[in-house]
Amino acid sequence: MAAWQSFTDGEYVLIQQFPLRPAVTASRSSLQKAFPKGLELLDSLRVPQTEIREIFSNLVGALQVHPVARKLESQHSNRTIGGELALLFERLDHDDCKLEPFLPLANAVLSEASDADIWKAAVKAIASSTRITPPSSFEPTFDGTPHTYSSSSHQGSEQTRRLLDAALRDELADCSFIKVGGFDEKYFEAKPWTARISQICEAAKGQHQNGKWEGLGDSPSERDMWDWLAEFQKEHLQNTPSIYYTTESPKDLEGSGTDRQLDIFTKSRSASASAEAKHQWAQVRVIGELSKSENFGAKFLQLARYARDVFTVQPTRTFLHAFLILGNTMELIVFDRAGSYSAEHFNIHNEPDRFIRVIAGYALMSDEELGLPGFIHCTGEQCWITADDSVDGLARRYGFRPLPIAVRRAIVSRGTCCYSTSDGLAVVKFSWSPAGRKPEAQLLQRAQSRGVEGVARLLASRRIMSVADLRRSLTFAAQRQMQSRLTDAQNSQSRSSSLLSGSRDADGRLGRSKRKNLDAAERSSSKRSRSNSQVRGTEITAKDSMDHPFQDRVLSCVIIAPAGRPLSQYISVSELLCALRDIVKAHRSLFEKGKILHRDISENNIIITDPLVNDGFTGMLIDMDLATTVGEDGTTNRSGAQAMTGTLKFMAIEILEMGLRDARRDIRHTYRHDMESLFYVFLSACINFGRSAKRPDPLRSWYTDSYKSMIRAKRGDMERGGFEFLVLTEFGSQFECAKGLASRLRELLFHKGDLFTQTDRDHSRLYGQIIDAFDQTLKEMGRP
């Protein structure tokens, strides 16, 4: 605990600069009234526990939003003390939360201790309560389903095992199925290679004696299992399309941007013949995890981290085969953009033929059977896809470069990835959009036909497949035990490492990232369907039912123009500001002429273009996967689901609040919410562009932890005092010239007094004011 007993000189200066007295005065009064003789042991107090809990909760809440809490870094995690206190605040809502860890903090406030001592007591409360009460995994939303996030917000230094496990647990827990019917029949039976499997099984019979495989005990080690498999491959898997490999260190696999060590994987025999010393993630075909441990949840999450890396490096992949061998038990798993599903696990000794059929099957599968994209054709440095021309509807081939220019890091998400066309003038985009949503191609065509300016133009499009297509002939009875198994893994990690595993990150995209992101509203709708199927106790087959127990998604391709640069590749600050100003103009044109609301204004959905060849626009809007049409009154047309969409980091406060308040279910996404999102894009650019990738994002509290914590963090940052101290002070030196603009935009959106988040019906006023603010700043910078 010694590390928690003192602060640095800089932290002491910070504490002195921002006194606690105004923030804790009300809590001190409540404590004095309730405990005139002081706090001792809780069991000796006659004050009701509910009253104590409420007083402690108010105190923690007051400290959480204090400027000092937002600056002090936690030594338990990569969060701030404010983020840790936010978790404590939520924990106090539960009756099983122990109150003893809060006594020193309450006593420090009651006795009017120094501010430094109060902050020390708060830090002790964080450390003590972390060991006692692990946080709740999920938080109810307006429709009784859990809010969940995806892992796509985790980039660079944020891709640690601890952070990813928390995000992937939430990303997969409510969309992963076990004991799926028809699994073996779909993937391992009646195949062109079935006859060879029979031959291999017959040849391997001699290795299975007295009910066991020779060389494999009741609970074989990783080394024993790999040695057995290597020998089996040498004897029985000659000339198969794929070969099994293992790694000795994380350095053996390159290309994902992270250090991961796969226990076992396959890659094609042709790639193996020409491979260099190290393997590439781009070559991985099947992944596996070997362990003597029987903690399925922990090993499943480990496998999910590997799957995330495969989908990142192979973004057009449609699904991925994986397996776990824990002791003598094997479980077969498939990951796709809607989650994961697995077959009934089995004992490798008791079912020898099935074991051989699976091991040999993975080595014999074709590219299509492994989920590799058959709709793309590549030769060397050139790839092609066939799509329908937007003008005459004729199918044409479009060439593109094989390396993506944008990829989302997540499993359960739209999996958006973009490629530059061969001539560099357009972009080929693939994405898995929620089924039932109006296709992006239709919205782009609508925008073009109505003369919308500043929005990407559609050249061609194609619907490729759906998750329901991929899962056809499989039977999903229910989620079964997957969620509880992941919760067991979470609790195990919490006990072993005092991990605040309740921290959850966003895909970025709600309507859920991850979530970049999925649509929370649609996710909720999907989960309602799933819950209904579980209540009925009936089995739902993807082939026969449109009401799937999973979130169906449709993979589509659009070719759009113009090509542009990501926002982060700005040449000058004035160019960046021009691009953002033009996005306001584009959004206004889309809203007024196209009667379309974008609903996902984010850093990734803005490109910098050449104004000389793109109608004077330096910035253009792309990606309308989450857009919706609006009525003549400017309100969004509902599709039956709560319209809670956007990239989490840039999501408007009122949209975040929508999911937590039953009384606010009438709120619809408006133009103002998108303008607020654009403001957050602007702030993030001024803070993070040019910042070292090794330094954590100062705005990470906007997309980590629970929804309540994110709302408090964003509200606190947008309050006038918080904005000036917590946000403007983080601007990079090159963006000093933009601080005045930032303050003006904050005032336009939130007003000068109490934080204003509502929408003015006169949309033209806000659009005009924001454009004028950008123009004034650009004029001061000498740019017309």
Image (cartoon, grey):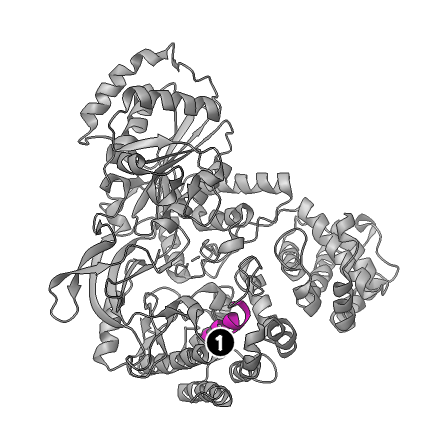
Counting from the top left corner in percent of width and height, residue 279 is at 39, 39
Identify the residue at horizontal 39%, vertical 61% (top origin). 519
Q: Which residue is mark 1?
A: 679
**80, 331: nearer the viewer:** 80
**191, 112: nearer the viewer:** 191
As displayed, is residue 163 above or below residue 606?
above
Identify the residue at horizontal 24%, vertical 62% (top origin). 422
Q: Is residue 777 left or right of residue 78?
A: left
Helix, strand or loop at label 1? It is helix
**33, 620: nearer the viewer:** 620
681 in magenta: yes
As displayed, is residue 751 above or below residue 158?
below
Counting from the top left corner in percent of width and height, residue 653 is at 51, 71
Q: Amino acid at mark 1?
A: Phe
Counting from the top left corner in percent of width and height, residue 309 is at 41, 47
Q: Is residue 542 left or right of residue 535?
A: left
Magenta residues span 678-688
